[in-house]
Amino acid sequence: MANFVINTTSYHVCMTGISFLSYANRYREAALVLASTPKTNNRFDPAVYFLYCLSLELHLKSFIWLHDKISRKNIKDTYRHDINKLWRHCKERGINKYAKPTPLRDHVIELIGPYYKNRKLNYLDLDMVFRGYTALKAEPRIVPTLDRLTKKLGQTLHDPILNES
């Protein structure tokens, strides 16, 4: 029997971009399922909005990771849940290569961003009940716009993120 010696080298695998993107796509899928479920009443349901915003947040964080090569902790500490800040910084860094910024996308993110950032879609909040839901319901393009944007980012970021991970 021959003796073999196998020398190995170490590898560094960075899962940050993939993890952001994978979760972003899963939250988008959950939003699609929930949006297609018939509602039993006509009340505002914040869950679909929340899931799309979470998906957008993670897609944008995956782009920031791809562009800036900074750690997950740094991305989380810098941006938290501020999709307005993320969107603004992504536009400055060339997100248009993956999804074109439009006035409608800017408007939708500007409108829903503060509610998402301040966790108004997560918890029962009287200000949200009396003002926020009305403001969001008055803009019927929010959900379709977030759906198209997150779908586009999921498709166009996949290969570049995979190649860099």
Image: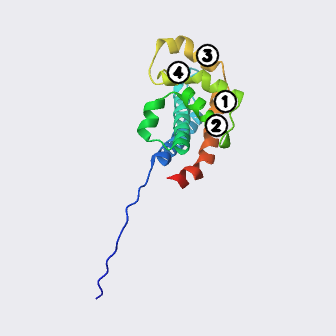
Mark positioned earlier in the residue sequence (3 or 2) = 3
Instruction: Examine the rendered structure and indicate whether residue 71 appears above or below residue 132.
Output: below
Question: Which residue corresponds to mark 4?
Answer: 115
Numbered tag placed on residue 149 in the rendering = 2
| Callout 3 touching callout 4 (CB < 8 Å) | no
Residue 49 picture quarter: top right
SS category of the residue bearing label 4: helix
- Give the crowd class for mark 3: few <14, some 14-19, many >=20 residues within 10 Å: few
SS category of the residue bearing label 1: helix
**Gap in angstroms between the C-alphas marked 4 and 2:** 19 Å
Q: Which is nearer the eye, 3 or 47?
A: 3
Question: Which residue corresponds to mark 1?
Answer: 105
Observer able to see residue 38 = no
Q: Quadrant of the N terminus?
A: bottom left
Q: Which is nearer the eye, 153 or 143?
A: 153
Question: Which amino acid is tagged 2?
Answer: Leu
In the image, farthest residue toward the right: 103
Mark positioned earlier in the residue sequence (3 or 4) = 4
**Gap in angstroms between the C-alphas marked 3 and 2:** 21 Å
